Image (cartoon, grey):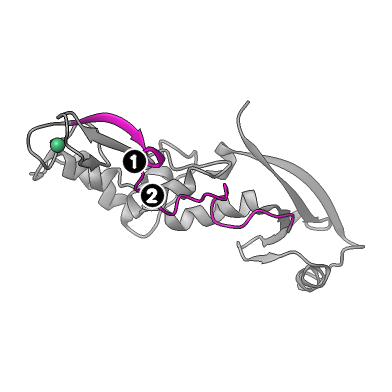
Amino acid sequence: MAASVSLKLMIDEKTNRVVAAEAEKDFVDILFSFLTFPMGTIIRLTSHEQLKIPVTIGCMNNLYRSIQNSLLNWHTELCKTMVLNPRNPCAIYCSKLKINIDDSGSEMNYACSRQGCRYLSKYQNVSCVCSKGVTTKEMKSDDSGSSVESCRYGGAFLQKGSIMFLITEDLQIRPASPHILAQLLSGFGLSETSGIREMPVEVSKEQVL
Ligand SMILES: [Zn+2]
């Protein structure tokens, strides 16, 4: 079964508009993971192939497409791969997310085919820096022993716990409390006891994207 996370939406009954959501850390971690994505990943994930309605971030989509569509003189083929499909430096943390939309394979390392060579590459089937082998052997970052901060507590970015978070429609996030909720709702002329309908929803990878 595909992974999903639960949210409780708070909907203004009059306008039928979502004003906020309440969620556990799993969902907030997913939102925070967006900030770790390299620009190349963001452009790829928000492109037409991935979304029905593509998102444009300035002229970055054109920059990305220029690389895809043009015959440019790359130093090596790997240089092109690196800019179109960059690696996330926080991949080991993102691999702990309940839903990770970054499908770049950033959490993988590739070991050299030459016996005794200890170099690792973030990319597969490229010449090793030892110049005598090719990076063929797949290893998860955890296997390499190099990820000293590999979230031993099992979470992604936030500590595990029962705390709930309030997320506004424009992605401001705060720990949930009756006082903060009342403040938030009063900004819309609402209160917890009037004008608000609560709706539980399950969010899947497609919806996070
Ligand atoms: Zn090597």
Front-lying residue, 40 or 155: 155
Q: Residue at x 78, y 55 (%)?
A: 10
Q: Which residue is drawn at 44% across and 54% down?
A: 149
Image coordinates of residue 83 in percent, x first then y, are: 25, 48
Q: Quick check: 195 above or below 91?
A: below
Answer with the quarter of the image where residue 135 lies: top left
| Neighbourhood count class around disc 1 (C-alpha, 10 Å): few under 14, some 14–19, many 20 upward | some
Image coordinates of residue 189 in percent, x first then y, are: 82, 71
Answer with the quarter of the image where residue 116 lies: top left
Q: Residue at x 30, y 47 (%)?
A: 86
In the displayed structure, does residue 166 sit left or right of residue 124?
Answer: right
> What is the tally of numbered marks visible in this picture?
2
Answer with the quarter of the image where residue 174 lies: bottom right
Q: How far apart are marks 2 and 1 (CA)?
A: 7 Å
Front-lying residue, 147 or 198: 147
Q: Residue at x 73, y 58 (%)?
A: 163
- The region drawn magenta spans 135-162
Disc 2 target residue: 147
Residue 189 lies in the magenta-colored region: no
Q: Quick check: 34 above or below 109?
A: below
Tell whether label 1 touches label 2 (CB within 8 Å): yes
Q: Quick check: 75 above or below 158?
A: above
Image coordinates of residue 188 in percent, x first then y, are: 77, 69
Residue 149 lies in the magenta-colored region: yes
Q: Which amino acid does label 2 sit on?
A: Ser
Front-lying residue, 87 or 39: 87
